[in-house]
Amino acid sequence: MEKREKISLSNAEWRIMDFLWDKNPATIADMVHYFDGITNWDRHVVIMMLKRMEAKGAVAWQTVGRAKQYYPVIEREQSCVQETKDFLERVYKGSLGLMLTTMVKQEKLAKGELEELRRILNEGEEDD
């Protein structure tokens, strides 16, 4: 698979991507209907964001009948990994240990969450 240039998405763009990853292809009308009541986005806001996302290389469209149907160009997993790396670098200067320590100390983790964290750490050790 070819290596893509990093694509940064705003919080609003992430919301649209989440929708498209789950329900693609989708028309502008589909998106306006879905986000109605969740956001205050009208048709023009959705169109503006889609144009910006298309320019970034995150989405593309094809005409079907009289409607443009949008679909994601980037993969969810790849985008999540990149966003996580960017967050870790920006907030914790790349220190996964510092992030985990902060989260464990600040959050009351449920027993199941602690068990899952232990499982993930153990799997990481096994991969080494």
Image: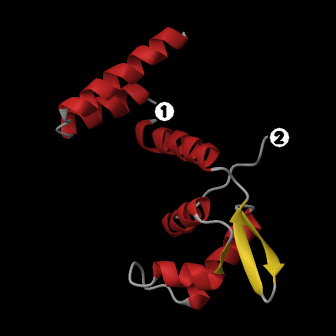
Q: Position of residue 7 (x, y in %)?
A: 67, 54
From mark 2 to mark 1, how far is it between C-alphas?
25 Å
Disc on res. 67 = none
Q: Position of residue 75 (x, y in %)?
A: 66, 50
Q: Which residue is mark 2?
A: 2
Q: Is residue 1 positioned above or below 123 on the image?
A: below
Give the residue drawn at x 81%, y 86%: 65
* Position of residue 1 in the picture relative to residue 75 (left or right): right
Q: Quadrant of residue 118?
A: top left
Q: Residues within 10 Å of mark 1 (few under 14, many from 20)?
A: some
Quadrant where the N terminus is found in the figure? top right
Which residue sits furthest left? 108
Q: Amino acid at mark 2?
A: Glu
Q: Position of residue 74 (x, y in %)?
A: 70, 54
Q: Number of marks in the image?
A: 2
Quadrant where the C terminus is found in the figure? top right
Q: Which residue is mark 1?
A: 94
Q: Position of residue 81 (x, y in %)?
A: 57, 41
Badge 1 marks a residue whose secondary structure is loop
Q: Amino acid at mark 1?
A: Gly
Q: Are marks 2 and 1 in contact (CB under 8 Å)?
A: no
